[in-house]
Image (cartoon, rainbow, N blue to C red):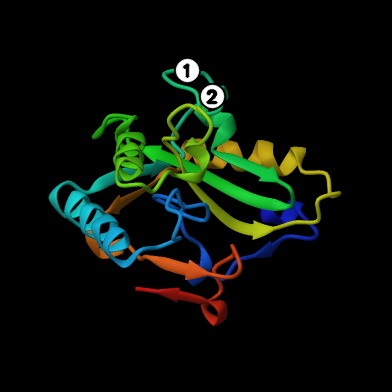
Amino acid sequence: LGTARLRSFTPRPPPDVHATIVSLSSPAHPNPYPDAAAEALRTFLRETFDREPLDARFGGFDAADRRFTSNGVPPYVRSLGVYGGKVVVIGWPDPATAGLDRLGRIREACGDLGFVHDYHRDGAPLDTDLYAVVGEVDPDEPVDAFLAEGRAALSRSPTRVRVDAGLLRFVTYEDTRLPAATSHAE
């Protein structure tokens, strides 16, 4: 992605890079994670992704692509960003194989089980993207050239990921970077 243009870029170790299906850092339940409710969520997600894996695509959207927007922004622009010093790659259900709203519908069903995705609170529109932090950069470093080069590279070379039940991990953590030392995955 042209990270040479960023003097302060620190990549995350590959095992720490993840995309969140449903973020439960603010559960709707009064008791944060009742065993029965958490198990119902795990079962639902495993069965959902076992029955029909989600084909996701990171990149492959050209600058003129306006089939959809994410947070009001075309996918070409939204596919790579720097937010608060975090370098983020964003993907979506592959429009060639799945409805773009499929992930949003899965998140909505999690809400029906009492686990509302953090980015779907307070009447926010259905969140349909997979957000992966791939590294950090000094928030004061200029990033425009990096973003232009990186978005062009992503548009030419999409990465497809098949998310099936075998890829799912249910993680409790202290640090949102999910380092192995302070995270527990099952």
Residue at the right extreme, as displayed: 140
Q: Quadrant of the C terminus?
A: bottom left
- Name which residue type carries label 2: Pro
Q: Is residue 147 left or right of residue 166?
A: right
| Disc on res. 66 | 1
Q: Is there any visible trace of residue 1 in the rendered image?
A: no
Residue at the bottom extreme, as displayed: 181
The residue nearer to you, when weighing 36 against 66, is: 36
Residue at the left extreme, as displayed: 51
**Mark 1 Cα shell of 10 Å, populated few (<14), some (14-19), many (≥20):** few
Instruction: Please name the residue shown 44% across and 48% down the image.
Output: 28
Of pointers 2 and 1, the one earlier in the residue sequence: 1
Instruction: Please name the residue shown 51% across and 62% down the image.
Output: 17
Q: Secondary structure at mark 2?
A: loop
State the separation of the CA atoms marked 2 and 1.
6 Å
Residue 55 spot, x, y in % from top left: 28, 44
Instruction: Please name the residue shown 44% across and 44% down the image.
Output: 117
- Name which residue type carries label 1: Arg
Residue 143 spot, x, y in % from top left: 77, 43
**Mark 2 Cα shell of 10 Å, populated few (<14), some (14-19), many (≥20):** some
CB within 8 Å, label 2 to label 1: yes
Instruction: Please name the residue shown 22% across and 53% down the image.
Output: 44
Q: Is residue 77 left or right of residue 161?
A: right
Q: Is there any visible trace of residue 146 in the rendered image?
A: yes
Q: Secondary structure at mark 1?
A: loop
Mark 2 sits on what residue? 74
Residue 57 spot, x, y in % from top left: 38, 42
Residue 64 spot, x, y in % from top left: 51, 18
